[in-house]
Image: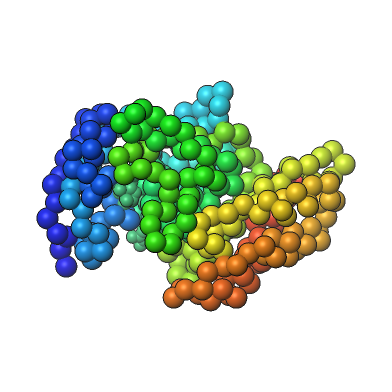
Amino acid sequence: MRPTRFAYVQPESVEDAVACLRTHGPDARVLAGGQSLLPLLNRRLLRPAALVDLRRLTGLRKVRQDGSGLRIGALTTHHDLETPQGPAAHPDWAVLAQTARLVGHLPIRTRGTVGGSLAHGDPVAEWCLLAVLLDAEITATGPDGSRTITADRFFTGATNGPRTALRWDEIITEVLFPAPAPTSALVEFSPQDKELPLVAAAAEVRLAADGTVAAVRLALAGAADRPVRARAAERALVGRPADTALPEAAASLVVRSLTPPDDARASSGYRRELATVLTTRALRASLRKADPR
Ligand SMILES: Cc1cc2nc3c(=O)[nH]c(=O)nc-3n(C[C@H](O)[C@H](O)[C@H](O)COP(=O)(O)OP(=O)(O)OC[C@H]3O[C@@H](n4cnc5c(N)ncnc54)[C@H](O)[C@@H]3O)c2cc1C
C-alpha cells in the first residue's frame, strides 16, 4: 500500500516549522527519522494533510553538557548516542548509550531520533522510560515560544487520544537529563529480538556510606498506558540495607501497585511476572554500579 497524498515541506528553522504546522492545521505531522511515522503512513493508519520534515534543522542534532545537565537535541539519532566516542560516552551517562543500543536494528537507530521517540510516546519505548526514570525535561516550541514539560507530565497515556502533552503546533527541540546517572540501569524483555519490548524496567540506586539505600528511582514500561515511576516502593526502600535480598523485596513492592494492560501482545498476568523479574534485574544491575565490590 502507498501513503495517501500529502503536502511536503522542509522548513529552514524551528519558527518556520511551527509556522508550517499552523498553516496546514492539526492534520499536519512533523517528520523526523520516519521510523515510526512512515510505517503508519504506508499502512494508511495515518493520513496527514502535510509532512513538515525537520531534516534541515541541523542545529537540533547536538548533545551538550552545561550546568543544568545533558541537553540532547531532538534530532539526535539513537546511533549518535550509542557509540563509544559519542557525546554521551562519559561513565556518568553510560545509561544513555545502553538505552540507545536497545532501540531496534542499526538502520532504525541511524535514522530514528530521540525527539521522535519521545513525541511518538510509545508506552514501552526505552527513551520514554528513561526520561521518566531520570526526571527529564522536554522542551517544546510552539507559536507562543518554548515551554518545558517534565517527563512525568509529558506522557499522558495511550487510550483514545494523544499519548503526550505535546500540542499539534509544537515541536520538541530538546530533552534535558538534569543529573548525571552513573548507577542507572535499564533492562527489557522482548519476544522478538530488536523489537519494542513487552515490558522494561529501569532503576537508579544511590548508597549511603553505611551501605543502606540513600535514594532510589524505579520506573516501568509496559505495565501501564504510559511509563510510570513506582514512587511508593521508592519511598519504602530508602534506609534499607542494600543486601542481596533487596532487589526481590523491592520488585514485590513495585508490582503491588500495578495493573498492567491486557492486550494482543500479552496478558496482564504475564506482564506482571515480567515486571517482577525485570525490576529485580534492573535493581541488581544498578546496585552493581553503585557498589562494584
Ligand atoms: C522494526 C522496528 C523496530 C523498532 N524498535 C524499537 C524499539 O525497540 N524501541 C523504540 O523505542 N522504538 C522502536 N521502533 C520505533 C522507532 O525506532 C522510534 O519510535 C523512532 O526512532 C522515532 O523517531 P523518528 O525520528 O523516526 O520519528 P518519526 O517516525 O519521524 O516520528 C514519530 C512521531 O513523532 C512526531 N515527531 C517526531 N519528531 C518530532 C519532534 N521533534 N517534535 C514533535 N513531533 C515529532 C512525528 O510527527 C510522529 O508522530 C522500532 C521501529 C521499527 C520499524
Q: Residue furthest right?
A: 210
Residue 189 spot, x, y in % from top left: 54, 66
- Residue at (39% x, 43% y) in the render: 166
Q: Quadrant of residue 58?
A: top left
Q: Above or below — where is 54 with respect to 231?
A: above
Q: Depth check: give the residue in front, 201 or 223.
A: 223
Residue 137 spot, x, y in % from top left: 51, 37
- Residue at (18% x, 43% y) in the render: 24
Residue 280 can be seen in this image: no
Q: Depth check: give the residue in front, 86 or 241.
A: 241
- Residue at (67% x, 47% y) in the render: 217
Q: Depth check: give the residue in front, 4 or 202.
A: 4
- Residue at (38% x, 57% y) in the render: 161
Side of 44 where 168 appears, left or right: right
Residue 171 spot, x, y in % from top left: 34, 38
Colour pattern: rainbow
Q: Locate the N terminus and report the quarter of the image it occupies.
A: bottom left
Q: Depth check: give the residue in front, 93 or 85.
A: 93
Count every numbered label the image shows and give the total. Answer: 0
Q: Quadrant of residue 201?
A: bottom right
Side of 268 where 127 appears, left or right: left
Residue 44 can be seen in this image: yes
Side of 216 where 243 appears, left or right: right
Residue 232 spot, x, y in % from top left: 71, 53
